[in-house]
Image: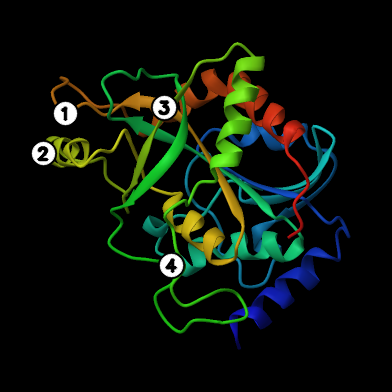
Amino acid sequence: MTLSQRIAETLSAIRQYTDLAPEVAITLGSGLGPLAEEVDDAATIPYSRLPHVPVSTAPGHAGRLVLGQLAGRPVVVMQGRIHAYEGYPQSDVAYLVRVMHALGAGTYIVTNACGGLNPAFQAGDLMLHTDYINFTGSNPLIGPNDDARGTRFPVTFDAYSPALRDVALRAARSLDLHLQQGIYAGVSGPVFFSRAELRMLRTLGADAIGMSTVPEVIVARHEGVRVLGISTVSDMAIADRDEHATGEDVLEMAAKVGPRFRGLVKAVVERLDPVAG
């Protein structure tokens, strides 16, 4: 079965719940899922009811697809994501990005909780992604290419849309919210990096580190979808500190930042220009 055939089967299952054609797709990272509760007229579908979709097992990830209205726009929201450290290939990790595009979404907002590497940051900041470093050791496009989905060699020079970044900055100013900007380093996990590894990533130019997002961004660009990335800096991953945050600390900080994060995403969605999928 081809990739496009699998996507068609997943779409058919979704259409049993709703015929909504979303303009915007959103992935909600660790501890950021409550935004999905603000989607109006929502159809909520557990991943387990969708063929070819892996089940999310990570803490803080509900594992549901939510379709409805947010800030007056039709959206499809991943309330929790799938990670490679759960045992899935990256092509499966990012599979729902392809499905959301097939539903009609031409804009993708990807979010996560991350560790801050830039000493000018602090826990609780929100960071706008300007670029990424794929340090996962893999790539979701490895294997046969389905030309119906995208080119064999997609360009990722501007993986994050400059136009969308401008929208996010304007939205942040309207909320009187300071928005950091930086480069996100994606790693495979599921361990927090050693001191030497953190120093290496900072030397390479990374401002933040996390265990997700990069596979989804690559697939979104393969599909021709424009991308905006926003991180919650849930802890500071500074090599010379005495201790490192735990997974529980990450979720706790994401919950504290939640109101500001939700306000920013809604302000961005409200300001987006419609883009055909």
Q: Position of residue 185 (x, y in %)?
A: 32, 44
Sequence order check, earlier mark of 2 and 4: 4
Residue at numbered disc 4: 140
Residue drawn at (85%, 59%), measured in percent from left and top? 17
Occupied quadrant, residue 121: top left
Q: Which comes before the other along the chain, label 2 or label 3?
A: 2
Mark 3 or 4, nearer chain start: 4
Q: Amino acid at mark 3?
A: Val
How far, Cα to Cα, is label 1 from label 4? 30 Å
Say which residue label 1 marks. Answer: 239
Crowd class of label 4 (few under 14; some 14 to 19; many from 20; radius 10 Å): some
Q: CA distance from mark 2 to mark 3?
A: 20 Å
Vertical relation: 273 (above or below) 267:
below
- Tell me which numbered mark, 1 or 3, is placed earlier along the sequence: 3
Earlier in the chain: of badge 1 and badge 4, it is 4
Residue bearing mark 3: 233
| Amino acid residing under circle 4 | Pro
Sequence-first disc among 2 and 1? 2
Does 66 sit above or below residue 247? below
* Amino acid on which disc 2 is placed: Ala
Can you see residue 29?
A: no
SS class, disc 1: loop
Task: Measuring from the top left, give residue 261's x and y in whole percent.
Answer: 59, 25
Please tell me which residue lies in front, 230 or 194.
230
The residue depicted at 26 percent of the width and 29 percent of the height is 237
The residue positioned farthest toward the bottom in the image shown? 1
Q: Residue at image x 50%, y 56%?
A: 216
Q: How far apart in space, not on screen, are marks 2 and 1 (Cα)?
A: 7 Å
Verify CB contact (< 8 Å) between mark 2 and mark 4. no
Residue 259 place in picture, x, y as percent? 62, 19
Disc 2: which residue: 196
